[in-house]
Amino acid sequence: MKHAFSTTNRAALALFIVAGLALVPLAQAAGSRGGGHGGGVHAGGGAKSKPQVNHSRTDKRTNNVRSTSVNSVNVNKNVNVNVDNNRGCCNNGWDNDYHPIATAAAVTATVAVTSAIVGSIVNAPPPGCVPVNYGGYIYQQCGSTWYQPQGTQYVVIAPPY
Amino acid sequence: MNKRLWCAMLGLLLAGPAAQAQTAAPAAAVANPVDAASVQALKDMGAHLQSLKRFRVSTELSGERVLTDGQKLTHSANATMDVARPDRLRATMRSPRSQRVLYFDGTNATLYTPALKVYSTVEVNDTLAGLVEKLENRFGIEVPLSDLFVWGTPAAPLDKIDSAMNAGQDFIGDELCDHYAFRQGQVDWQIWISTGPKPLPRKVVITNRADEARPQSVSLISWNLNPGFNDAVFRFVPPKGATQAQIVAPKTK
C-alpha cells in the first residue's frame, strides 16, 4: 500500500509536468485544425451518421487520474483478488477507454527520448507505424513513439508499456 | 408559544444526541453479518443464469474515476451481447473513444475496432467462463458483464463474503426486484435481482473502498431471452481492407 502511494505521487508529479509541456502542441494543433476538420475525414465503416467525439477541448487535468481509483465494473473481478491478475497493469476495464496521455513510470524517460511530443495531435500517424492491441485497445506504434486514436485524429502518448 | 414550551423543546434538542448515541451502540454489533438468505439468492440467480442457453443482454454503465485532488469524473459506456452457451459470444462495446466488437465462436476470439478496421485474433478453445478468464489474465481484456458467466460457477465463490443483507425491494424499470448488499474486503457491492422463479440481475453497483473517494460504478442490465440471432453472428469475417494488429500480453509495471 505504501509503495503504491509513493508510485502514485511520482506519477502524479510526472503527469503534471507532462500536462504543462503538452499545452503548447495541443494549442497549436487546435489552431491549425480549424480548416482541416471540416473535411469530414471518417476512418472506415462502423458508425454512420453518428457525430464524432471531439476531445480537443478536454481539460488536461482530466488526465490526473489516481491509480487507486481504478474501479472494475465486474463484481467477481473485484472480489476475487488474485495475485496474478493484471489490474495493476493497464486499467483494462471494458468501459475504460480512458488512457492517460502519459501513464505512470514511463513518463520521464519518454519526454527525454521521444521526438514527437507527448500530447501533440496529428491527423494521421507517420508511414511505417504498426497497429498494436494492448489491453484491448488499438494503438499505432512508430518506433518509440505511440499514437492513440482520438476521434478522426491521433494523439501522441507515452508508451502504454 | 410560551416560555415553558420553549424550555421543553430546548431540553429535547439537547437530549437528542445523547439519546441517539445510546441507541446506536447496540445496533453496531450484529451477531452474524452474513445473512444466509441473501447468499442463497445469489446462488439461485447463478443457477438460473447458467441454465440460460441463448440470450441477448445489454448494459448501460456509469463509472467513476478519481483525480489526484479527489475530484470525481463520471464516464458512460454501454454494451450489447449475444450469447449462446456454452461457447458463443458477440459483444459490442461502446464508449466515447471507441466502439469495439468481440467475437467468440468457441475456437477463436477476435477483437475488432470498426472505426480503424483493425482486428486481433487469439485462439481460445474454451467455454465462456474460460474465455473471460483467459482474455483477462493473458491479454488484459475485460469482457463486459463477465459476472454473468462466472456467477453460478466455482469461479464466483460465496464463502468469502464479510457481510450480506437484504436491502428491501425496488423497481428497476417496471420489474420488481429484491435488493441485496454485500461487503467483501475493500469492495461493497449491491445487486437488484428480479423477483419470482426466474431471478435475473437487473442492476449492479460496485463501490471501491480502497480509495477514500469511494469511486462507484452503476450497471443497468436488460434482457431478451428470445433473441432472433443465428450462429453466424459469432463468427468474425475480416471486412475488406481490414488489418490485423499484434496483441501484446500485459506487462507488469
Image: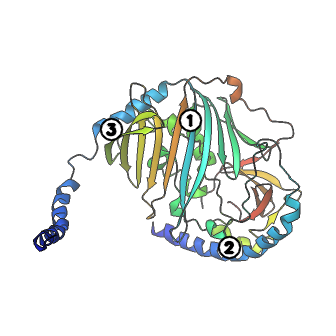
Give the CA separation, mark 1 to mark 2. Answer: 40 Å
**Residue A97 image offset from top left, x and y in percent:** 65, 53
**Disc ID at residue B130:** 1
Q: Chain of mark 3?
A: B
Outermost residue, front direction? B1
**Residue B95 image offset from top left, x and y in percent:** 65, 49
Give the residue type that dot 2 points to.
Ala
The foreground one among B126 and A149 is A149
Residue A143 visible to the viewer? yes
Q: Quadrant location of residue B11?
A: bottom left
Q: Chain of mark 1?
A: B
Of the residues tagged 1 and 2, which is closer to the observer?
Answer: 2
Q: Secondary structure at mark 3?
A: helix
**Residue A106 image offset from top left, x and y in percent:** 67, 68
A119 up-or-down from B143: above or below:
below
Residue at position x 44%, y 53% in the image: B207
Tag 1: Cα neighbours inside 10 Å, few (<14), some, or many (≥20)?
Answer: some
Are the residues flagged by discs 1 and 3 in contact, CB closer than 8 Å? no
How many numbered discs sit on the rendered protein? 3
Q: Answer left or right for A13 relative to B117.
A: left
Q: Quadrant location of residue A33?
A: bottom right
The foreground one among A54 and A97 is A54
**Residue B137 image offset from top left, x and y in percent:** 58, 46
Residues behind callouts 1 and 3 on a single chain: yes
Give the residue type that dot 1 points to.
Gly
Are the residues flagged by discs 1 and 2 in contact, CB closer than 8 Å? no
Residue behind mark 2: A19
Residue behind mark 3: B38
